[in-house]
Amino acid sequence: MPELILGRICQAATSARQLDQAIAGVDRVLGQSESVQHIHFLPAIVISQFCPSAFQACALGSQNCSVQSDYAELGETTAYQLHQAGVTHCLIGSASRRQAFMEDDSDLSRKIKNCLDVGIRPVLCLSLPQISREWNMQSVWLAQQIWQIYSNLTAEEQGQVLILFEGAEGDELSAQALERVAQLIRDTIFEIAGEAIAQSLELIYSIKALEGLNLDLLAQGVFDGVCSNDRTLSDDDWLAVIKNLQAHYLMVK
């Protein structure tokens, strides 16, 4: 198991060449590090242009998969097709897709199962709702969402889900708020799935700027890694984040 999980969602790149340069840059910095797992989440349309074996440290992920297992809706890709293209991870239920396509929790459970059936690790995206800024309301909503998704999964399936906390729309949460969210997620999964699965849960959070990186949250085991989006954090800044982690987190560990 890696000491640190890093994710990079690539939405802003205008060409496969630009993506290749971004992935290669991260690959050069990380080298053959066994302590870091780095996943680039790419648009499905370009995944087939990349060969996973060409990179030492970077794995390929997809930003979505079809809710159907035996065929894909127009414009989508099945988990099996993604697996054949070399994908190892897949985002499930990102806030932008939930809003744009009205995906419900039962759809997300089905996508998780489809991914696991073919050997892809699902990355379940969770975020705080915009309905209220009151923590009491936000926490109830978030816990209910986890319950509705996890209750449709077997114990084995529950234990293989990686969770990405995307944050709150437009806000960079404080370290205290992030710690509170992480505890809620772990406590909720403990109630649903038991101690073993809650303790083995791998949880990462999204950063929107260099200042969003909090080494203490990683060192204390509150989170197991971080993720960024190239729409809000440039490739150069993401490399700076990785180098910072190498210098101040991995060396200490």
Image (cartoon, helix red, strand yellow):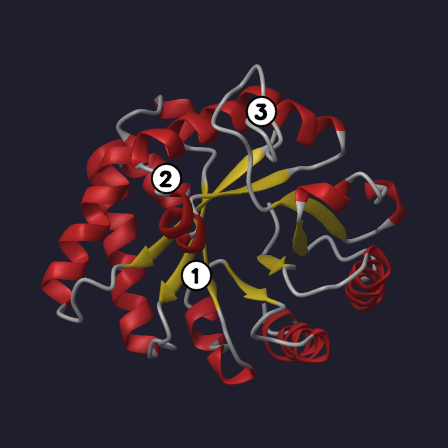
Along the polypeptide, which appears first: circle 3 or circle 1?
Answer: 3
**Residue 16: where, in percent of width, then height?**
82, 55
Q: Which residue is mark 1?
A: 223
**Mark 2 residue type:** Glu
**Mark 3 residue type:** Ala
**Label 2 neighbour load within 10 Å: few <14, some 14-19, many 20+:** some
Along the polypeptide, which appears first: circle 3 or circle 2?
Answer: 3
Q: Is residue 222 visible?
A: no
Q: Is residue 253 visible?
A: yes
- Element under label 2? loop
Label for residue 103? 2
213 on left or right of 25: left
- Element under label 1? loop
Label for residue 180? none
**Mark 1 residue type:** Phe
237 on left or right of 199: right
Identity of the residue furthest to the bottom in this view: 211
Residue in the image at 58% along x and 65% along y: 229
Alpha carbon distance from label 2 to label 1: 26 Å
The foreground one among 183 and 109 is 109
**Residue 247: where, in percent of width, then height?**
67, 79
Residue in the image at 89% along x and 47% along y: 54
Locate the N terminus and report the quarter of the image it occupies. top right
89 on left or right of 176: right
**Residue 20: where, in percent of width, then height?**
84, 58
